[in-house]
Amino acid sequence: MSRKLYWYMCQNIVGTEDHVKQIRLLNAVKDNLSISKTMMSITSGSFGEGLQMRGSDLDIMMVYRTIEVYDVKPSFNPNIAYLSMQTEGVKPGFTQLRLEYMTFRNLFDCCVNFADQYYLSNKLWKQRFGFTMGIIHGPCISDSKGINDIADCLHCKTWGHPANIYHDAVSGWLMLASFFYKIKQYTKALHIIMYSISKCTFEKLNGCTKMSNIHHQLFKLKSLQDKSIVHLWRLIFVDVIEFEHNSILIPNELALVLNNSSIAIPSAAYAVFLNCLCHYHLKNVRQCQESFKVLQWVITNNYLIPDRRSSSTAFHLLDIAFQFLGDTESARQA
Protein backbone atom coordinates (compact mmCIF):
# COMPACT_ATOMS: atom_id res chain seq x y z
CA MET A 1 0.00 0.00 0.00
CA SER A 2 2.88 2.41 0.82
CA ARG A 3 4.44 1.85 -2.63
CA LYS A 4 1.12 2.33 -4.41
CA LEU A 5 0.53 5.55 -2.48
CA TYR A 6 4.07 6.74 -3.30
CA TRP A 7 3.68 6.11 -7.05
CA TYR A 8 0.22 7.65 -7.10
CA MET A 9 1.53 10.85 -5.46
CA CYS A 10 4.50 11.00 -7.85
CA GLN A 11 2.32 10.68 -10.94
CA ASN A 12 -0.71 12.74 -9.90
CA ILE A 13 0.11 15.10 -7.03
CA VAL A 14 3.71 16.10 -6.25
CA GLY A 15 5.75 14.99 -9.28
CA THR A 16 8.85 12.79 -9.50
CA GLU A 17 11.74 12.95 -7.05
CA ASP A 18 13.97 14.71 -9.61
CA HIS A 19 11.25 17.28 -10.32
CA VAL A 20 10.89 18.04 -6.61
CA LYS A 21 14.69 18.41 -6.23
CA GLN A 22 14.85 20.84 -9.17
CA ILE A 23 12.17 23.08 -7.65
CA ARG A 24 13.97 23.06 -4.29
CA LEU A 25 17.25 24.01 -5.97
CA LEU A 26 15.62 26.86 -7.89
CA ASN A 27 14.04 28.15 -4.68
CA ALA A 28 17.38 28.02 -2.87
CA VAL A 29 19.11 29.96 -5.68
CA LYS A 30 16.35 32.58 -5.78
CA ASP A 31 16.42 33.02 -2.00
CA ASN A 32 20.22 33.39 -1.95
CA LEU A 33 20.15 36.03 -4.69
CA SER A 34 17.54 38.06 -2.78
CA ILE A 35 19.59 38.42 0.42
CA SER A 36 20.39 42.00 1.44
CA LYS A 37 22.08 43.53 4.49
CA THR A 38 18.75 43.96 6.27
CA MET A 39 16.40 41.29 4.86
CA MET A 40 16.39 37.71 3.72
CA SER A 41 13.50 35.86 2.07
CA ILE A 42 12.89 32.12 2.41
CA THR A 43 10.48 30.29 0.15
CA SER A 44 8.59 27.94 2.46
CA GLY A 45 5.40 25.91 2.57
CA SER A 46 4.68 23.20 0.05
CA PHE A 47 6.36 25.02 -2.84
CA GLY A 48 9.46 25.59 -0.73
CA GLU A 49 9.58 21.83 -0.23
CA GLY A 50 9.43 21.35 -3.99
CA LEU A 51 5.73 20.47 -4.17
CA GLN A 52 3.51 22.21 -6.71
CA MET A 53 0.11 21.57 -5.15
CA ARG A 54 -2.88 22.68 -7.19
CA GLY A 55 -4.61 25.63 -5.54
CA SER A 56 -1.82 26.16 -3.00
CA ASP A 57 -0.55 29.66 -2.22
CA LEU A 58 3.09 30.82 -2.19
CA ASP A 59 4.48 31.04 1.35
CA ILE A 60 7.36 33.47 1.90
CA MET A 61 9.24 34.08 5.16
CA MET A 62 10.78 37.55 5.41
CA VAL A 63 13.60 37.43 7.96
CA TYR A 64 14.82 40.69 9.52
CA ARG A 65 18.62 40.42 9.75
CA THR A 66 18.97 43.55 11.92
CA ILE A 67 17.02 42.00 14.81
CA GLU A 68 18.06 38.95 16.82
CA VAL A 69 16.04 36.96 19.35
CA TYR A 70 17.94 35.04 22.01
CA ASP A 71 17.44 32.62 24.87
CA VAL A 72 21.14 32.49 25.78
CA LYS A 73 22.79 35.92 25.69
CA PRO A 74 24.93 36.21 22.53
CA SER A 75 28.04 38.22 21.76
CA PHE A 76 27.03 41.86 21.49
CA ASN A 77 26.86 43.55 18.09
CA PRO A 78 26.01 47.29 18.25
CA ASN A 79 24.45 47.12 14.78
CA ILE A 80 21.88 44.51 15.85
CA ALA A 81 18.72 45.01 17.92
CA TYR A 82 18.13 42.36 20.58
CA LEU A 83 14.97 40.79 22.00
CA SER A 84 15.16 38.23 24.80
CA MET A 85 12.77 35.30 25.16
CA GLN A 86 10.62 35.37 28.30
CA THR A 87 8.82 32.04 28.78
CA GLU A 88 7.73 32.19 32.41
CA GLY A 89 3.95 31.98 32.69
CA VAL A 90 3.62 31.43 28.92
CA LYS A 91 2.02 28.41 27.25
CA PRO A 92 4.40 25.77 25.85
CA GLY A 93 5.55 26.64 22.36
CA PHE A 94 5.08 30.39 22.88
CA THR A 95 7.25 33.18 24.22
CA GLN A 96 7.16 36.89 25.00
CA LEU A 97 9.90 39.01 23.41
CA ARG A 98 11.40 41.67 25.67
CA LEU A 99 13.30 44.57 24.14
CA GLU A 100 16.90 44.62 25.38
CA TYR A 101 18.67 46.86 22.86
CA MET A 102 17.48 48.74 19.79
CA THR A 103 19.15 50.30 16.79
CA PHE A 104 16.15 51.97 15.16
CA ARG A 105 13.07 53.79 16.46
CA ASN A 106 10.55 51.72 14.52
CA LEU A 107 11.20 48.69 16.72
CA PHE A 108 10.53 50.67 19.91
CA ASP A 109 7.27 51.94 18.42
CA CYS A 110 6.17 48.30 18.04
CA CYS A 111 6.57 47.61 21.77
CA VAL A 112 4.24 47.99 24.74
CA ASN A 113 5.18 48.77 28.33
CA PHE A 114 4.47 46.18 30.99
CA ALA A 115 5.95 46.28 34.54
CA ASP A 116 8.57 48.83 33.41
CA GLN A 117 9.74 46.55 30.61
CA TYR A 118 9.06 46.83 26.88
CA TYR A 119 7.70 43.85 24.95
CA LEU A 120 7.18 43.40 21.23
CA SER A 121 3.51 43.72 20.25
CA ASN A 122 2.28 41.52 17.42
CA LYS A 123 -0.56 43.95 16.72
CA LEU A 124 1.64 47.05 16.62
CA TRP A 125 4.18 45.29 14.42
CA LYS A 126 1.54 44.49 11.81
CA GLN A 127 0.20 48.05 11.89
CA ARG A 128 3.67 49.57 11.67
CA PHE A 129 4.95 47.48 8.80
CA GLY A 130 1.97 47.71 6.49
CA PHE A 131 0.09 44.52 7.30
CA THR A 132 -3.18 46.44 6.99
CA MET A 133 -2.75 46.42 3.20
CA GLY A 134 -3.67 42.73 2.95
CA ILE A 135 -5.67 39.99 4.62
CA ILE A 136 -4.35 38.71 7.94
CA HIS A 137 -4.06 34.91 8.29
CA GLY A 138 -2.80 34.38 11.82
CA PRO A 139 0.83 35.51 11.81
CA CYS A 140 0.84 35.97 8.00
CA ILE A 141 -0.42 38.51 5.51
CA SER A 142 -2.04 37.46 2.24
CA ASP A 143 -2.84 39.47 -0.85
CA SER A 144 -6.45 39.98 -1.88
CA LYS A 145 -6.30 37.06 -4.35
CA GLY A 146 -4.82 34.65 -1.81
CA ILE A 147 -1.80 33.92 -4.02
CA ASN A 148 1.00 35.11 -1.70
CA ASP A 149 1.21 34.42 2.03
CA ILE A 150 4.00 36.39 3.74
CA ALA A 151 5.25 35.98 7.31
CA ASP A 152 7.63 38.46 8.94
CA CYS A 153 10.20 36.49 10.96
CA LEU A 154 12.89 37.12 13.57
CA HIS A 155 15.89 34.83 13.87
CA CYS A 156 16.86 32.95 17.02
CA LYS A 157 20.05 30.85 17.01
CA THR A 158 18.95 28.60 19.89
CA TRP A 159 15.85 26.60 20.79
CA GLY A 160 13.83 28.02 23.65
CA HIS A 161 12.93 25.83 26.62
CA PRO A 162 9.24 25.38 25.64
CA ALA A 163 10.25 23.84 22.31
CA ASN A 164 10.43 20.36 23.88
CA ILE A 165 10.11 16.92 22.33
CA TYR A 166 6.32 17.08 22.10
CA HIS A 167 6.43 19.96 19.60
CA ASP A 168 8.60 17.83 17.30
CA ALA A 169 6.52 14.65 17.74
CA VAL A 170 3.84 13.51 15.30
CA SER A 171 1.14 14.64 17.72
CA GLY A 172 2.59 18.15 17.73
CA TRP A 173 2.30 18.39 13.95
CA LEU A 174 -1.23 17.01 14.08
CA MET A 175 -2.20 19.66 16.63
CA LEU A 176 -1.03 22.26 14.14
CA ALA A 177 -2.98 20.54 11.37
CA SER A 178 -6.06 20.57 13.63
CA PHE A 179 -5.64 24.31 14.09
CA PHE A 180 -5.65 24.92 10.34
CA TYR A 181 -8.62 22.58 9.97
CA LYS A 182 -10.59 24.52 12.59
CA ILE A 183 -10.01 27.82 10.76
CA LYS A 184 -11.01 26.11 7.50
CA GLN A 185 -7.54 26.29 5.95
CA TYR A 186 -7.94 22.75 4.67
CA THR A 187 -5.17 22.81 2.07
CA LYS A 188 -2.58 23.94 4.61
CA ALA A 189 -3.82 21.28 7.02
CA LEU A 190 -3.35 18.63 4.30
CA HIS A 191 0.30 19.59 3.79
CA ILE A 192 1.01 19.06 7.49
CA ILE A 193 -1.05 15.87 7.63
CA MET A 194 0.89 14.32 4.74
CA TYR A 195 4.15 15.13 6.52
CA SER A 196 2.80 13.54 9.70
CA ILE A 197 1.66 10.42 7.84
CA SER A 198 5.14 10.08 6.35
CA LYS A 199 6.44 9.67 9.92
CA CYS A 200 3.98 6.86 10.72
CA THR A 201 6.02 4.01 9.23
CA PHE A 202 5.86 0.36 10.26
CA GLU A 203 9.16 0.27 12.18
CA LYS A 204 8.07 3.01 14.61
CA LEU A 205 7.35 2.30 18.27
CA ASN A 206 4.22 3.27 20.18
CA GLY A 207 3.15 3.06 23.79
CA CYS A 208 2.84 -0.72 24.22
CA THR A 209 4.97 -2.02 21.34
CA LYS A 210 7.64 -4.58 22.19
CA MET A 211 10.99 -4.02 20.52
CA SER A 212 11.58 -6.37 17.59
CA ASN A 213 14.77 -7.38 15.83
CA ILE A 214 14.26 -4.44 13.48
CA HIS A 215 14.35 -2.01 16.40
CA HIS A 216 17.46 -3.63 17.88
CA GLN A 217 19.20 -3.37 14.50
CA LEU A 218 18.19 0.29 14.22
CA PHE A 219 19.81 1.11 17.54
CA LYS A 220 23.03 -0.57 16.42
CA LEU A 221 23.39 1.81 13.48
CA LYS A 222 26.46 3.99 13.92
CA SER A 223 24.51 7.05 12.81
CA LEU A 224 22.16 6.64 15.79
CA GLN A 225 24.56 5.68 18.54
CA ASP A 226 25.70 9.25 19.18
CA LYS A 227 22.19 10.72 19.16
CA SER A 228 20.47 12.02 22.28
CA ILE A 229 17.45 10.38 23.87
CA VAL A 230 15.30 13.30 22.69
CA HIS A 231 16.46 12.82 19.09
CA LEU A 232 15.84 9.06 19.22
CA TRP A 233 12.38 9.67 20.70
CA ARG A 234 11.45 11.89 17.76
CA LEU A 235 12.93 9.42 15.30
CA ILE A 236 11.31 6.13 16.29
CA PHE A 237 8.30 6.91 18.48
CA VAL A 238 4.76 7.64 17.28
CA ASP A 239 2.75 8.97 20.19
CA VAL A 240 -0.95 9.59 20.71
CA ILE A 241 -2.61 12.94 20.24
CA GLU A 242 -4.42 14.14 23.35
CA PHE A 243 -7.25 16.65 23.49
CA GLU A 244 -8.38 18.13 26.77
CA HIS A 245 -12.11 18.65 27.30
CA ASN A 246 -13.44 21.76 25.57
CA SER A 247 -10.23 22.08 23.53
CA ILE A 248 -10.67 24.58 20.71
CA LEU A 249 -8.61 22.32 18.42
CA ILE A 250 -11.00 19.35 18.44
CA PRO A 251 -12.69 18.99 15.02
CA ASN A 252 -16.40 19.74 15.31
CA GLU A 253 -17.28 16.31 13.93
CA LEU A 254 -15.35 14.69 16.80
CA ALA A 255 -16.46 17.12 19.51
CA LEU A 256 -20.09 16.10 18.98
CA VAL A 257 -19.42 12.59 20.34
CA LEU A 258 -17.02 13.51 23.17
CA ASN A 259 -19.54 15.20 25.47
CA ASN A 260 -16.88 17.62 26.76
CA SER A 261 -14.55 14.82 27.84
CA SER A 262 -10.83 14.51 27.14
CA ILE A 263 -9.55 11.91 24.69
CA ALA A 264 -6.29 10.30 23.52
CA ILE A 265 -6.25 9.10 19.90
CA PRO A 266 -3.59 7.04 18.07
CA SER A 267 -1.76 9.53 15.86
CA ALA A 268 -1.73 7.39 12.71
CA ALA A 269 -5.50 6.86 12.81
CA TYR A 270 -6.19 10.51 13.61
CA ALA A 271 -3.94 11.72 10.78
CA VAL A 272 -5.82 9.67 8.18
CA PHE A 273 -9.18 10.66 9.73
CA LEU A 274 -8.31 14.37 9.53
CA ASN A 275 -7.03 13.84 6.00
CA CYS A 276 -10.43 12.39 5.06
CA LEU A 277 -12.25 15.33 6.67
CA CYS A 278 -10.18 17.90 4.79
CA HIS A 279 -10.84 16.28 1.43
CA TYR A 280 -14.53 16.03 2.33
CA HIS A 281 -14.79 19.78 2.93
CA LEU A 282 -12.75 20.54 -0.20
CA LYS A 283 -15.21 18.35 -2.14
CA ASN A 284 -12.35 16.13 -3.33
CA VAL A 285 -14.60 13.09 -3.62
CA ARG A 286 -12.05 10.58 -4.90
CA GLN A 287 -9.35 11.58 -2.40
CA CYS A 288 -11.91 11.48 0.41
CA GLN A 289 -12.97 7.96 -0.51
CA GLU A 290 -9.35 6.82 -0.79
CA SER A 291 -8.55 8.31 2.63
CA PHE A 292 -11.56 6.54 4.08
CA LYS A 293 -10.31 3.19 2.74
CA VAL A 294 -6.91 3.84 4.29
CA LEU A 295 -8.61 4.72 7.59
CA GLN A 296 -10.46 1.39 7.51
CA TRP A 297 -7.21 -0.45 6.86
CA VAL A 298 -5.31 1.36 9.65
CA ILE A 299 -8.00 0.62 12.23
CA THR A 300 -8.86 -2.97 11.28
CA ASN A 301 -5.15 -3.87 11.19
CA ASN A 302 -4.34 -2.01 14.43
CA TYR A 303 -1.60 -0.10 12.60
CA LEU A 304 0.42 1.79 15.26
CA ILE A 305 -2.51 1.38 17.65
CA PRO A 306 -1.01 0.33 21.00
CA ASP A 307 -3.87 -1.30 22.95
CA ARG A 308 -7.58 -2.18 23.08
CA ARG A 309 -8.59 1.15 24.54
CA SER A 310 -6.86 3.01 21.70
CA SER A 311 -8.46 0.63 19.23
CA SER A 312 -11.90 1.43 20.63
CA THR A 313 -11.17 5.15 20.31
CA ALA A 314 -10.02 4.65 16.73
CA PHE A 315 -13.26 2.88 15.85
CA HIS A 316 -15.10 6.03 16.98
CA LEU A 317 -13.26 7.84 14.17
CA LEU A 318 -14.44 5.23 11.70
CA ASP A 319 -18.00 5.61 13.00
CA ILE A 320 -17.86 9.39 12.48
CA ALA A 321 -16.38 8.97 9.00
CA PHE A 322 -19.19 6.61 8.04
CA GLN A 323 -21.72 9.20 9.20
CA PHE A 324 -20.41 12.24 7.37
CA LEU A 325 -20.00 10.14 4.22
CA GLY A 326 -23.68 9.25 4.50
CA ASP A 327 -23.32 5.53 5.31
CA THR A 328 -25.53 5.47 8.39
CA GLU A 329 -26.12 1.71 8.23
CA SER A 330 -22.39 0.94 8.40
CA ALA A 331 -22.05 3.58 11.13
CA ARG A 332 -24.47 1.65 13.32
CA GLN A 333 -22.46 -1.55 12.77
CA ALA A 334 -19.01 0.03 13.36
Image (cartoon, grey):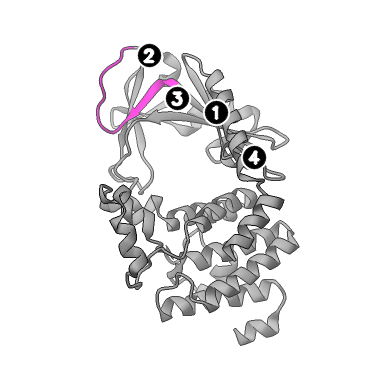
Q: Give the residue type that dot 2 points to.
A: Thr
Secondary structure at badge 2 equals: loop
In the rendered image, the vertical position of residue 114 relative to residue 251, given as above or below:
above
Residue toward you, 66 or 94: 66
**In the rendering, which numbered label is found on residue 19?**
4
Secondary structure at badge 1 equals: helix
Dot 3: few (<14), some (14–19), or many (≥20) neighbours within 10 Å?
A: some
Membership of 77 in magenta stretch: yes
Residue toward you, 237 or 174: 237
Cβ–Cβ under 8 Å for marks 2 and 4: no
Q: Is residue 330 left or right of residue 220?
A: right
Q: Give the residue type that dot 1 points to.
A: Ala
Q: Residue at x 37, y 58 (%)?
A: 236
The location of residue 238, given as percent across then percent down, is 41, 62
The location of residue 211, given as percent across then percent down, is 32, 69
Q: Is residue 320 left or right of residue 247?
A: right
Q: Which residues are magenta?
A: 65-78
**Label whose residue precedes the other's in the sequence (3 or 1):** 1
Q: Give the residue type that dot 4 points to.
A: His
Membership of 114 in magenta stretch: no
